[in-house]
Amino acid sequence: MTREGSNDGLLHREITSSILESFFQVHYELGFGFLESIYAKAMEHVLIESGHHVRRESPIDVFFRGERSGHFRADLIVESAVLVEIKCAEQLDPNAQAQVLNYLRATNIEVALLLHFGPKARFKRFVFANHRKLLPR
């Protein structure tokens, strides 16, 4: 996978920058206190307006030893390159980070953003290179 523009070397920097800009717009306009589904729909709307291809509630299978063990639904996948997980509780659950890393492990996607629509807008960026993943996809 190639790295996008800029000297900082961040994988998919242009996409993640656009997602974060959208995140801060949505948080500013809606504030704190809505359900995750409201924020996800608003994010989808703003990202599509910005010209991005977005999949919402996209099912992703998880395999163990060649057998499908289950699946999860990613809140958003932008440009088939960045997975977005949305949380909106007052405090961010520490398990949210493990959840996002597991999502990355189960896919060929290498970059994820955890967006916290809490009282204060916060985010965390994750990178999990495909060559380091143990789970077959």
Image (cartoon, rainbow, N blue to C red):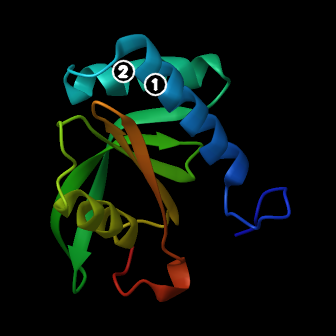
Say if residue 129 shows up in the picture: yes
**For the point 56% across and 26% down, which residue is it?**
47
Which element carries disc 2, helix, strand or loop? helix
Q: Is residue 118 above or below residue 27?
A: below
Residue 112 at x, y percent in the picture: 46, 56
Return the residue nearer the eye: 92 or 129.
92
> Vertically, is 92 above or below 7?
above
- How far apart, in angstroms, are the residues tagged by discs 1 and 2? 5 Å
Mark 2 is on which residue type?
A: Lys
Q: Which quadrant of the view contains residue 15?
A: top right
Crowding at mark 2 (Cα within 10 Å: few <14, some 14-19, many 20+): some
Labelled pair 1, 2 in contact (Cβ < 8 Å): yes
Residue that protrudes farthest toward the top in the picture: 29
Q: Nearer the viewer, residue 37 or 91?
A: 91
Q: Which residue is mark 1?
A: 44
Residue furthest out toward the front: 120
Quadrant assignment for the N terminus: bottom right
Q: Which amino acid type is shown beneath numbered disc 1? A: Glu
The residue that label 2 is drawn on is: 41
Q: Position of residue 116 (x, y in %)?
A: 33, 40
On-image quarter of the C terminus: bottom left
Left or right of 61, for residue 80:
right
Asked if 41 appears above or below 113 in the picture, the reply is above
* Res. 113 visible in picture: no
Q: Residues within 10 Å of mark 1 (few under 14, many from 20)?
A: many
Spot occupied by residue 136 in the image (x, y as percentages of width and height): 37, 80
**Element type where label 1 sits in the image:** helix
Tell me which residue sits at (18%, 62%) in the image. Answer: 95
Q: Position of residue 18 (x, y in %)?
A: 64, 36
